[in-house]
């Protein structure tokens, strides 16, 4: 009996690796990296959209200021103070 016990105690123990535990960390890391990349891409494209709109608004504002200046110039050209001397002369 003693010999059998000795054999069983000194035998090598064979263990299978638990792959789910060893793959959990890299999968989590790459998942977080992918999430970060998607957030960064969303912010990048939002910034491009914002810059495009701001540029469009700036062009519209410049055009409206010029149009407003032209209106003031026409209004001043047709003011009674300018037309009266031209009508007499």
Image (cartoon, rainbow, N blue to C red):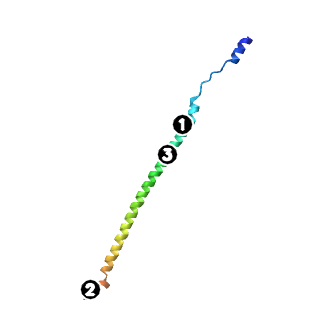
Q: CA distance from mark 1 to mark 3?
A: 15 Å
Q: CA distance from mark 2 to mark 1?
A: 86 Å
- Residue 25 percent coordinates (x, y): 57, 36
How busy is the neighbourhood of tag 3: few (under 14 within 10 Å), some, or many (20 plus)?
A: few
Q: Tell me, yes or no, whether the two marked residues, 2 and 3, touch with CB atoms within 8 Å.
A: no
- Residue 57 percent coordinates (x, y): 40, 62
Kindly state the secondary structure of the residue where label 1 is placed.
Answer: helix
Give the residue pinned by disc 3.
Answer: 37
Q: Left or right of 2: which side holds 37? A: left
Q: Residue at x 60, y 24 (%)?
A: 16
Q: Earlier in the sequence, mark 2 or mark 3?
A: 3
Q: Earlier in the sequence, mark 1 or mark 3?
A: 1
**Mark 2 or 3, which is nearer the eye?**
3
Q: Residue at x 53, y 39 (%)?
A: 30
Q: Residue at x 43, y 57 (%)?
A: 51
- Residue 78 percent coordinates (x, y): 30, 80
How busy is the neighbourhood of tag 2: few (under 14 within 10 Å), some, or many (20 plus)?
A: few
In the rendered view, tell whether residue 30 sits above or below residue 13: below
- Locate the N terminus and report the quarter of the image it occupies: top right
Q: Quadrant of residue 53?
A: bottom left
In the rendered view, tell whether residue 19 sits above or below residue 10: below
Disc on res. 86: 2
Q: Residue furthest right?
A: 2
Give the residue pinned by disc 1.
Answer: 27
Q: Earlier in the sequence, mark 2 or mark 1?
A: 1
Q: Residue furthest top?
A: 1
- Residue 8 percent coordinates (x, y): 69, 16
Q: Left or right of 17: which side holds 9? A: right
Q: CA distance from mark 2 to mark 3?
A: 71 Å
Q: Residue furthest bottom?
A: 88
Kindly state the secondary structure of the residue where label 2 is placed.
Answer: helix
């Amino acid at each position: 009996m003693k010999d059998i016990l000795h054999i069983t105690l000194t035998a090598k123990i064979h263990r299978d690796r638990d792959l789910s535990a060893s793959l959990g960390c890299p999968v989590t890391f790459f998942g977080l990296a992918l999430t970060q990349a998607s957030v960064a891409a969303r912010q990048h494209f939002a910034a491009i959209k914002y810059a495009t709109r701001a540029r469009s608004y700036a062009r519209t504002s410049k055009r409206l200021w010029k149009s407003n200046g032209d209106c003031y110039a026409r209004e001043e050209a047709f003011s009674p103070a300018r037309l009266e001397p031209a009508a007499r002369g």
